Image: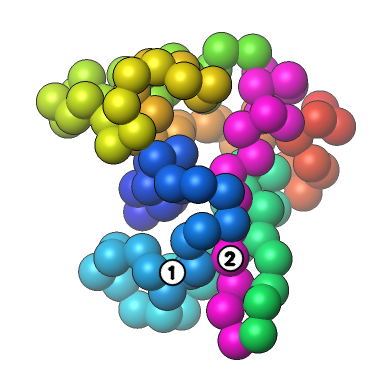
Amino acid sequence: MRRAIVRELAGSPEWSRACGTFELGVSKATRSHHFTVLRQSGLVEQRDSGARRFNRLRRAEFDAAFPGLLALVLAECANRTGSTGSSGPAGPGGPGESGEVRASASTVGTDAPVGAR
């Protein structure tokens, strides 16, 4: 679920996706849990606007802490699924920006922001 969220955020403009716009096939509580984990890990930033919570992938911060990792993972996942990416050719995030993120708990799974590690 979290990799699907990151993949969709990678192919969307910043702050354009509210939590409820992700088709994940899980309950609202489960979706909320996955967004909480992504936020606490430092991969996603959220901003409330009225009754909606909008998201952005913290790509620059993640790339500063772990150069090339996000682009590599997104490209690997795009190759695994046979996707060419929803955002076209390689851009700031690297090739196949529609891929997924897989990070171990030892690198991203703390409450500290990405750049603090």
Please tell me which residue is depicted at 55% across the width and 31% down the height of the picture.
104
For label 2, the residue is 54
Scheme of colours in the image: rainbow
| Disc 2 element | strand
Give yes or no for residue 35 being in the magenta stretch.
no
- Image coordinates for residue 35, horizontal then vertical, percent: 54, 61
Q: Residue furthest bottom?
A: 51
Q: Is residue 67 left or right of residue 77?
A: right
Residue 106: tell me if it is visible: no
Please tell me which residue is depicted at 51% across the width and 58% down the height of the picture.
16
- Image coordinates for residue 54, horizontal then vertical, percent: 58, 65
| Disc 1 element | helix
- Does residue 64 lie above or below 41 as drawn? above
Q: Nearer the viewer, residue 12 or 44?
A: 12
- Image coordinates for residue 83, horizontal then vertical, percent: 18, 29
- Does residue 1 lie above or below 22 as drawn? above
- Does residue 46 lie above or below 10 as drawn? below
* Labels 1 and 2: the sequence-earlier one: 1
The amino acid on which the numbered mark 2 sits, given as a three-letter code, is Phe
Q: Nearer the viewer, residue 26 or 75?
A: 75
Q: Quadrant of residue 101?
A: top left
Residue 82: tell me if it is visible: yes
